């Protein structure tokens, strides 16, 4: 396990890094990675939401990483697909969620990519309204 910055090098200098990459119509034969998670959050129409697996289990996001170059550090991005029915009311896309038992199939290419890079069935996620708490940058007495 390694800690990498989130965001692949942009095409043009000064642009934002690529933090997500569309999976549809693409293959990823190398540089695959997993990002462990227990939930993800999204803001929609000014409200904050948390998305967790309905069974409470933790999971992985399917990701890709790139080696460092002279101009950019080793980094990763998360793959996305069209949102499933649980997430679609809040956003049209979602990060690819892999259950724990699918992790090695993603890393080792032992299952076809379309079997893994897909939205999970309706009812997979529990959605909760989340009150965003602004964290204090520093605290001093």
Image (spheres, grey):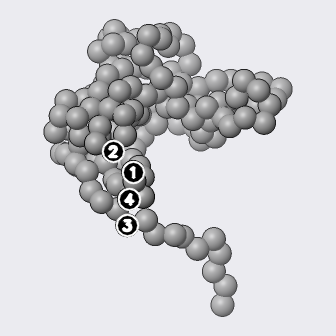
From the viewer's perspective, is the residue at label 3 or at label 1 nearer?
A: 1
Dot 1 corresponds to which residue? 44
**Disc 2 residue crowd, few under 14, some 14–19, many 20+, Cα 10 Å:** some
Q: CA distance from mark 4 to mark 1?
A: 5 Å
Task: Return the disc, 1 or 2, that comes first in the chain's sequence.
Answer: 1
**Helix, strand, or loop for circle 3?**
loop
Residue 26 coordinates in the image, percent (x, y): 47, 11
Residue at the disc numbered 3: 131
Please tell me the numbered disc located at residue 90.
2
Looking at the image, is mark 2 or mark 3 earlier in the sequence?
2
Mark 3 surroundings within 10 Å by alpha-carbon count, few (fewer than 14), some (14 through 19), many (20 or more): few
Q: Mark 4 or mark 3: which is in front?
A: 4
Do the numbered discs 1 and 2 sit on residues whose CB atoms are within 8 Å? yes
| 3 over 42 or under it: above or below | above
Q: CA distance from mark 2 to mark 4?
A: 10 Å
Give the SS element for disc 2: loop
Quickly name the residue at label 4: 47
3D distance between C-alphas at marks 1 and 2: 6 Å
């Amino acid at each position: 396990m390694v800690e990498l910055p989130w965001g692949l090098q942009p095409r043009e200098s000064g642009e934002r890094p690529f933090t997500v990459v569309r999976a549809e119509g693409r293959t990823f034969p190398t540089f695959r990675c997993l990002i462990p998670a227990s939930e993800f959050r999204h803001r929609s129409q000014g409200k904050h939401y948390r998305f967790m697996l309905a069974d409470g289990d933790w999971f992985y996001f399917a990701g890709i990483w790139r080696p460092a170059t002279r101009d950019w550090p080793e980094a990763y991005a998360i793959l996305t697909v069209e949102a499933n029915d649980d997430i679609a009311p809040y956003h049209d896309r979602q990060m690819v969620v892999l259950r724990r038992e699918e992790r090695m199939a993603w890393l080792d290419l032992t299952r076809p990519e379309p079997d893994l890079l897909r939205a999970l069935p309706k009812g997979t996620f529990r959605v909760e309204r989340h009150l965003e708490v602004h964290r204090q940058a520093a605290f001093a007495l």
